[in-house]
Amino acid sequence: MNYLALDASTEACSVALQVNGKTFSRYALCPQSHSLHLLPMIDAVLNEAGIKLAKLDGLIFGQGPGSFTGVRIGVGVAQGLAFSANLPVVGVSSLQAMAQLAYIKYGQKQVVAAIDARMSEVYNGYFILDKNNIMQAQQAEAVTPPEKLTEHLSSVVTGSFYAVGTGWDAYSEKLGEQLFSLKINEGSPAVLFPTAQAMLSIGKVKLEQGQGVSAEDAQPVYVRDTVSWKKLPGK
């Protein structure tokens, strides 16, 4: 089975294509310019693999959480491609993808993902590897003030974990001693952003399990539904 994965949910922009068991990928850190990079990346991997979009069996997209604009770009591109080639689509969480990347690259099986959500909050989730070697969320993903993260995770995190995501650097002073005492990796996380290649590992399982939907049913997952803007003093 041949699948294309794409993600624009964070500062990173990436695509990954699996064709006949081989993987072709592109990755770049390009904040605020995903719309310029995503389609050329997709063309590049399709050309490298020598396959047309219509010959694929499904499309995987990063559904968020993350940048509102980036998530919308990724979902919009996925819908357009899927409509044009009549492909089923499936969304993958950016938090789950980072946890999956920690397993793929470092063999980690218990992961807390925390992305800087701005406005003094973090998108977060706790993941454990299942019997199919896929990281699975142990509770609903959430957006939480960093100083409340220990309380939020206390009912599910009972032992040491591997930390991924930009939230650990952005709010290191607010995350609390209890969480840092359980965190097994020191310093800045080695995994800061999701990749389409990690999403490919998750999404192809979902597609093969029949979880694919039509293009019009592809939905983003923002976790935070609204954005409030605070005026600067004197403005």
Image (cartoon, rainbow, N blue to C red):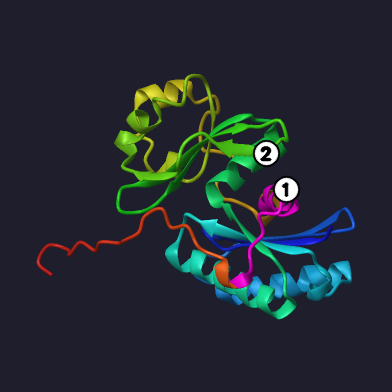
Image location (x, y in percent) of residue 132: 73, 35
Image location (x, y in percent) of residue 91: 60, 57
Q: Work out whether 27 lies above or below 146.
A: below
- Our reading of the magenta stretch's main secondary structure is helix
| Amino acid type for the residue under numbered disc 1 | Val
| Amino acid type for the residue under numbered disc 2 | Ile
Q: Along the line of sight, which residue is nearer the eye, 94 or 91? A: 91
Position of 186 compared to 14: left or right? left
Crowd rating for badge 2 (residues with CA inside 10 Å; few <14, some 14–19, many 20+): many
Position of 32 compared to 36: left or right? left
Numbered range of the magenta stretch: 199-215
**Could you say whether the residue bearing mark 1 is in a helix, strand or loop?**
helix
**Could you say whether the residue bearing mark 2 is in a helix, strand or loop?**
loop
The residue that disc 2 covers is 134
In the displayed orientation, state which residue is furthest to the left. 234
- Which numbered circle lies on residue 183? none
Q: Work out whether 134 lies above or below 90.
A: above
Disc 2 and disc 1: Cα gap in Å? 9 Å
For the question of whether residue 233 can be seen, the reply is: yes
Image location (x, y in percent) of residue 37: 63, 72
Label pair 2/1, CB-CB below 8 angstroms: yes
Position of 193 compared to 123: left or right? right
The residue that disc 1 covers is 205
